[in-house]
Image (spheres, grey):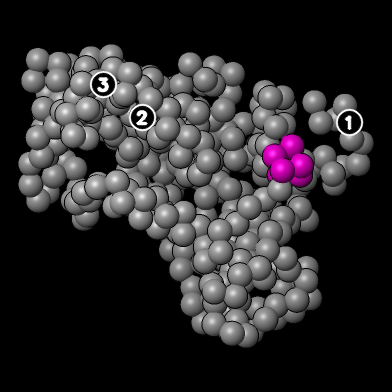
Amino acid sequence: HIRKYFKNDRIIQLLEFPVLFLGALPAKTPALYSLMNYADIKLGTWYPEGGMHKIVEGLVSLAYEKGVTFKFNQNVVKIDVDNGIASKVVTNNEIHTADIVIGGADYHHIEQKLIAAPYRKYTKKYWDKREMAPSSLIFYLGINKKLKHLLHHNLFFDEDFGIHGSEIYENPQWPSKPLFYVSVTSQTDAEVSPEGCENLLILIPIAPGLEDNDEIRQKYYQLVMDRLERLTKQSIAKHVIVKKSYCINDFVRDYNAFKGNAYGLANTLRQTAILKPSMRSKKIKNLFYTGQLTVPGPGVPPAIISGQVVAQQVKKQFPITLAKALA
């Protein structure tokens, strides 16, 4: 689709790169997703001052205003089901009775680990056949000087796009010569770093389910740092004063992410719209799902929209229960 409008290889790569995170090579991704480029180029890229966490803070603040009660640091270990109704949510700290349960955690984890087998809609075989979007190796860096030749958003295409894409989707392995993305939020927002310093994020898309250890992470840190210094013509590594990595093992540990994925299900034709895992459990009347493994899909905006969609479903199915709760 993009090649109908552009011939320059570099422009084509720039316009195809975003769909790499959707779960397939550009040639296998529905042309519908060119809307992502329209949104970026025509509507603009928006950033909340103070960082992306400000979105979370805003949602929490609104929830408090509406009378929501939060129970933090409680790991859900089980959802009890009685006669097709989710009656209790069991955490590591206490047991909560429930009228309606909305699962915002990893869909696979909830269905395969938290509810008993007779109440699962999808089988292990079903999940094993799902095509996943990429995971990521991310480096969070604090730099004690200002950097040149970098913007808020930076894409590095100094290696072959096709090879990296193939090593994610067709022959899953750690990439030989990865493309990568660099975000320098401090170029735009003075709040995210001390004066005279930079806040850097480096992201490499990788196949989900790969072996992940410190040795591998350090290898790729050195690889991208060497290229970053060479391409931007400045020393960076010796000015790193804060360094943290995040990868497959972390996605599994913190989010119970299926195969350590970072971007949900691949947006192929057979996994789009109504062909995604259902928002409502077919076997548990009051259990609903939200998040990146269901409709409409992965990413911050779609995940928030997912919450809106499931809220409408709950209001439709349980109007009396909600009216009593709000009263």
For the N terminus, give its image quadrant: top right
Question: Could you tell me which residue is drawn at 31 percent across and 24 percent down?
Answer: 314
Amino acid identity at mark 2 = Ala
Residue under label 1 = 5
**Residue 180 appears anywhere in the view:** yes
Query: Looking at the image, is mark 2 or mark 1 earlier in the sequence?
Result: 1
Question: Could you tell me which residue is drawn at 14 percent across and 20 percent down?
Answer: 85
Q: Position of residue 218 (x, y in %)?
A: 51, 66
Residue under label 2 = 311
Q: Is residue 260 above or below residue 127?
A: below
The Cα–Cα distance between marks 2 and 1, rounded to whole angstroms, is 40 Å
118 on left or right of 106? left
Q: Dot 1 lies on which element?
A: loop
Residue sticking out furthest to the front: 327
Quarter occupied by residue 171: top right
Q: Residues within 10 Å of mark 2 (few under 14, many from 20)?
A: some
State how many labels appear: 3
CB atoms at circles 3 and 1 under 8 Å apart? no
- Choose between 52 and 239: the one closer to the eye: 52
Mark identifier at residue 319: 3
Q: Position of residue 131 (x, y in %)?
A: 50, 27
Q: Which residues are magenta?
A: 37-43
Q: Dot 3 lies on which element?
A: helix
207 on left or right of 288? right
CB atoms at circles 2 and 1 under 8 Å apart? no
322 on left or right of 29? left
Looking at the rendered image, the disc whose residue lies closer to the viewer, 2 or 1, is 2
